[in-house]
Amino acid sequence: QVQLVESGGGLVQAGGSLRLSCAASGRTFSSYAMGWFRQAPEKEREFVVALNWNGGRVYYADSVKGRFTVSRDNTKNTVSLQMNGLKPEDTAVYYCAARLGGSGYALNEYEYGYWGQGTQVTVSS
């Protein structure tokens, strides 16, 4: 199993930047594909980005492509999400997720078996 803890959320003005981090417990972090999802108030949770076990394969949602950059450090058991050019519509709770079987990446939230508690990102206009 793996436990996930997100951090780095906060309040930022439109056009600003935030860096989210996801710290994972366990010794087999490299066995997991990872993803970030977000959920805005009164909306369904939506996919943001997914990456495979070593970050060599990455897939971004169109809404964040070119603004967000994901990376992972398997030596530190962390995944980071650098968010630049933030927009009010990026306001949401951001969740880190893990999926055992890291060769590919997964876009569907139901493919992930482990979730963090989420971190709030608020972008003011």
Image (spheres, grey):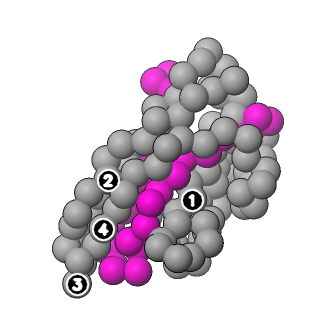
Q: In the rendered image, which quarter contains the N terminus?
A: top right
Q: Residues within 10 Å of mark 1 (few under 14, many from 20)?
A: many
Q: Residue at x 46, y 24 (%)?
A: 76
- The amino acid on which the numbered mark 3 sits, given as a three-letter code, is Ser
Q: Residues within 10 Å of mark 4 (few under 14, many from 20)?
A: many
What is the distance, in whole Å, between disc 1 and disc 2 at their CAs? 14 Å
Q: Secondary structure at mark 4?
A: strand
- The amino acid on which the numbered mark 1 sits, given as a three-letter code, is Phe
What is the distance, in whole Å, between disc 3 and disc 4 at their CAs? 10 Å
Q: On screen, 97 above or below 1?
A: below
Q: Residues within 10 Å of mark 2 (few under 14, many from 20)?
A: some
What is the distance, in whole Å, between disc 4 and disc 1 at their CAs? 15 Å
Report x, y in % for residue 54.
63, 37
- The amino acid on which the numbered mark 4 sits, given as a three-letter code, is Thr
Are dots 1 and 2 in contact, CB under 8 Å?
A: no
Specify the label residue 122 is tagged with. 4
Specify the label residue 37 is tagged with. 1
Q: Residue at x 80, y 36 (%)?
A: 101
Residue hosting label 3:
125
Point out the stretch of residues depicted in magenta. 73-102
Q: Residues within 10 Å of mark 3 (few under 14, many from 20)?
A: few
Q: Secondary structure at mark 1?
A: strand
Q: In the rendered image, which quarter contains the C terminus?
A: bottom left
Lower sequence index among marks 2 and 3: 2
Lower sequence index among marks 4 and 2: 2
Lower sequence index among marks 3 and 1: 1
Q: Secondary structure at mark 2?
A: loop
Q: Residue at x 28, y 73 (%)?
A: 123
Indicate the quadrant where residue 97 lies: top right
Q: Do we see residue 31 in this rendering? A: yes
